[in-house]
Every structure is written in structure tokens, then in C-alpha cells.
Image (spheres, helix red, strand yellow):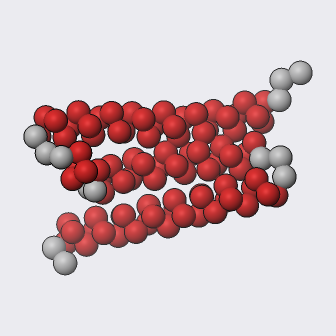
Amino acid sequence: MINWLSVVGSSFWVAGLALMLAGLSYYHWMARQLDRPLRQVMSEPRFQTVLMSGLLLVGVGLVITAGNPWQTIPAGALILICLLALVAISRDNRRQRRGE
């Protein structure tokens, strides 16, 4: 019998890894088009948002597929860290737009 919860959970972390890989590929291409170092492009909030969103999806997938608390706790911590990082990135973007 198919464990559908495991399928759904696995799809979250696979989608998260795919998002991070696609983001890295896109920003690597963008760095070459703009003739800027990849490190400089990766330090921008847009890349960090993509990375944190991908990690968030990985964490959600790991929580869903976790078999015991020792697997759930680190995955939950990953989700919390990603949410806090996304909030911080969002606040920094708002401050930069306002010119503070």
C-alpha cells in the first residue's frame, strides 16, 4: 500500500531542493550577464529569499516524513530559522525601499 503522507512529505523537500538549484542556476547566469562576481549576486536579498524558501520547503518535508521526535526537532528548528530569516530579509527590503 502506498503511504501518501510520505509521498506528500517527500514532494515538499524535493521541491525545495529543486527551487534552490534553480535559483542558484539562475543567479549564476545573472552574475555572468551582469559581469559581476557570483558572491556579490548571492549576497542580494532576492537570492537569499529563494534560498530560504527552498530550505523552508525542505524542512516542511522533513517534518512530515519524520519518524520520531529526534528527526522532528531539528527539522522544526530548520523551519523556525528559515521563517526568521525570511522575516529579517523582508524587513531589510522595506527599510532599503524607504531609504533608511
Q: Is residue 19 left or right of residue 33?
A: right
| Front one among 91 and 63 | 63
Q: What percent of the width, then of the height, locates residue 61?
A: 66, 43
Q: What percent of the width, then of the height, locates residue 67?
A: 83, 46
Q: What percent of the width, then of the height, locates residue 78?
A: 60, 58
Residue under the image location 42 percent in, 35 percent down: 21
32 to 100, vertically: above or below: above
Name of the residue lying farthest toward the left: 35
Name of the residue lying farthest toward the top: 1
Residue under the image location 48 percent in, 33 percent down: 18
Q: Is residue 74 left or right of residue 91?
A: right
Looking at the rendering, in which quadrant would you find the N terminus?
top right
Looking at the rendering, in which quadrant would you find the C terminus?
bottom left
Please identify the quarter of the rendering in which residue 45 is found. bottom left
Residue under the image location 54 percent in, 35 percent down: 15
Please identify the quarter of the rendering in which residue 86 is found. bottom left
Residue under the image location 59 percent in, 45 percent down: 58
Q: What percent of the width, then of the height, locates residue 11?
A: 63, 33
